[in-house]
Image (cartoon, helix red, strand yellow):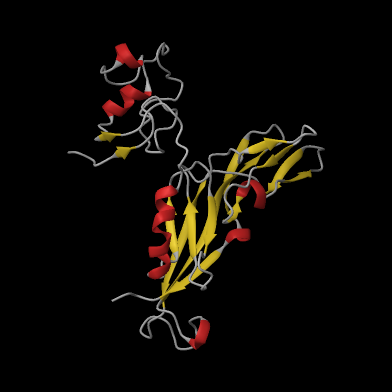
Amino acid sequence: MRTGNVTTSGIQDATLGTMGSHVTARSHYAPSGDSKPAKGKTLRENGGLGSISEQVVYTRVDVTMGNNNSNAQPGTLVRHLQPLFEKYDVGIVISGHDEMLKASYVDDDNNGKRTYHWDVGVASDGLRADKRIKQEDGTYKPYRFNTHSFWMAQKDEPEIWKTNENGVKHLASGGKHLGHLEMIASLFSPEIVPAGTAPVVEGGVVPAYSVRMTPIAAFPLLDDNYDVTIIERRETPSNQITVTGRFIK
C-alpha cells in the first residue's frame, strides 16, 4: 500500500524532511558506508551502502522533490496560509519541520485573532541550539530570524545546576530534553461543564472549547556517577498556553 509520503529534501540529505525514513542507524553514510549495510539493495552502486537514497527506496517514499542543495525557504508555504488562518480563527497550527521544540505567535493584522504555531520537531527537542552569528569581539549571538518566536527551550528554559551534599553537581531543572507536546482539550457545553466554571473571553462570551498546550520533558535523574536512575515527567510552565475557540458550522 502506498503511503502518500512526499519529501522536498535532497535525497542525500542527512535528515530527510523529518519523515523518519532512517530505517537504520545514522552511521550509514554514502558512498562508502560501513560494515553494517542498510536493508534493501537498490541504489547501493550510486548511493553507497546504507545511504539515505537507499533508505528512501526501502521506505517507499512516493515522491522525491529537490536536490542536494539546502532549502532557503523554510516555512514559506505556511506563511502564505496565515491570512486564511486568521480569517477562520485558527488558533493552533502543529508542524514538524524542524528538530527543535518551539512556538511562534502570529497576529499579522493585529486584530487579536492570533495563531500559535508549534514546531514539535522529530522527537520533542533535537537537543541543538538555534543558529548563532559570530560578532566582531569573537562572541556569538543568536540569529533571531524568526521575529514571531514565542518560546523555545534553548532560550526560555535555562539549565539550573545544584551541588549536592557529596559535592557533585546535578541538573535540577531546565535545559533541552526529549519528550512531547501535551494538548488537553476541554468542552464547555452545559451538559459537560457546570454553569459558571467555563472561562469567559472578550465580550463576556463563553467559548465552546479550550485547548491547553504544555511542553513535557522526559527529565533524567542521575546518581553521583551520572548514571540514569529514573526518568521524570517534567512540565515546562514557562510555555503553558491555553487557546479558546468556537465550533464553525
Position of residue 68 relative to residue 112, above or below, is above
Q: Quadrant of the rendered structure where residue 58 is?
A: top left
Q: Quadrant of the C terminus?
A: bottom left
Q: Is residue 128 left or right of residue 210?
A: right
Tell me what residue is drawn at x 39 percent, y 76 percent.
246
Count all numbered tags in the image, as a single digit.
0
Q: Nearer the viewer, residue 138 or 241?
A: 138
Position of residue 45 relative to residue 102, above or below, is above
Picture coordinates of residue 50, whole percent (x, y): 37, 19
Q: Is residue 143 left or right of residue 77?
A: right
Q: Quadrant of the N terminus?
A: top left
Tell me what residue is drawn at x 50 percent, y 84 percent.
197
Can the viewer see residue 200?
no
Q: Is residue 16 left or right of residue 2?
A: right
Picture coordinates of residue 70, whole percent (x, y): 46, 32
Q: Nearer the viewer, residue 244 or 219?
A: 244
Picture coordinates of residue 117, whole percent (x, y): 48, 57
Picture coordinates of residue 199, whole percent (x, y): 51, 80
Position of residue 28 relative to residue 143, above or below, is above
Tell me what residue is drawn at x 43 percent, y 18 percent.
29
Q: Quadrant of the rendered structure where residue 131 is?
A: top right
Q: Nearer the viewer, residue 81 or 7?
A: 81
Can the viewer see residue 169?
yes
Q: Quadrant of the rendered structure where residue 171 is?
A: top right
Q: Is residue 184 left or right of residue 54?
A: right
Tell me what residue is drawn at x 76 percent, y 35 percent.
139
Query: Farthest residue toward the left?
Result: 1
